[in-house]
Amino acid sequence: MEHQSLYQYLLSLGDNALILGQRLGELCGHGPSLETDIACTNIALDLLGQTRSCFQYASKQLEGKSEDDVAFLRKENEYTNVLLVEQPNNDFAFVITRQYFFDVYHLMLMEWLSANSADETVKAIANKAVKEARYHRRFSSDWMLRLGDGTEESHQRVLAAVEALWPYTQEFFVPSEAEAWAASAGVGPDLASFKAAYYNDVEALLEQATVPIPENPYFQKGGKQGRHTEHMGYLLADLQYMQRTYPNMTW
């Protein structure tokens, strides 16, 4: 039972990074400038590296599983990422806002795991990831300020992105069964304990960026339980194509 619970918890860590990394990978060659394009691609590679560490460890929890099986051969309802990270790349302001909302949470999570996790492998994975997460947050924070307090067009685009993505942020703090198990076992944190600090940080930056806090009281959830938006199926079709078309291929 413990192996199954740890497996599910590792999926929750890896799936967020995998799906957001896939989204950022779609932008390769389409950034607004060469420097920004390379930065987004590097962030995608960081996230995919974190995914691989999680899935390598996850595959050891179940006999006969490989990291490729975990990454590519699950059905849509078996992925446990939050709904935020699967949202499409509508425009650059949308990409940055999605990234920023994730980065604030991700850094808090990696810092806790690297300092406190009772599982030494999870702790080691987070210890490496936290250095990357700090850069990711700095990058997305800087761009939120530039776009929000920039031109009239950039300001309006960030306003629209924040309004659209805000309802997905609360799902971070609603624990799945695996996350609740991790908290009880000391492997992961009590996610609710991050909530106040998260919104304090996000709202402070939005104020700096001259972006008002959305008044929408309704939030979306379900990704952690495998109930995804209509965008997820199309994303997985791209992500899984090679492995499903050429099973067990080697390079």
Image: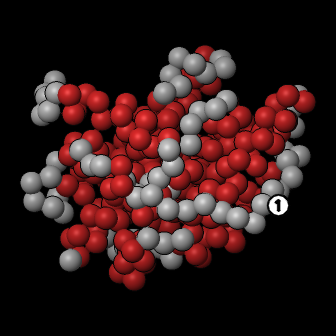
Query: The N terminus is located in which quarter?
Result: bottom left
Graded by Cα atoms within 10 Å as few (under 14), some (14 to 19) or many (20 or more), the crowding at tag 1 reads few
Foreground residue, 92 or 144? 92
What residue lies at 49% left-to-right and 27% top-to-bottom?
Answer: 26
The extreme front residue here reads 230
- Figure check: 38 above or below 125: above
- Figure check: 114 above or below 94: below
Left of 94 or right of it: where is 83? Answer: left
Residue 128 visible? The answer is no
Left of 217 or right of it: where is 132? Answer: left
Foreground residue, 83 or 196? 83
Q: Which residue in the structure is indicated by mark 1?
A: 215
Measured as percent of width and height from the top left, residue 235 is found at 43, 36
Question: Can you tell which quarter of the image residue 63 is in?
Answer: bottom left
Measured as percent of width and height from the top left, residue 127 is found at 42, 56
- Figure check: 216 above or below 3: above
Foreground residue, 223 or 186? 223
Measured as percent of width and height from the top left, residue 98 is found at 63, 44
| Kind of residue at badge 1 | Glu
- Judged from the image, the secondary structure of the residue bearing numbered disc 1 is loop
- Figure check: 46 above or below 39: below
What residue lies at 58% left-to-right and 75% top-to-bottom?
Answer: 192
Left of 237 or right of it: where is 41? Answer: right
Measured as percent of width and height from the top left, residue 133 is found at 53, 48
What residue lies at 31% left-to-right and 64% top-to-bottom?
Answer: 8
Query: The C terminus is located in which quarter?
Result: top left
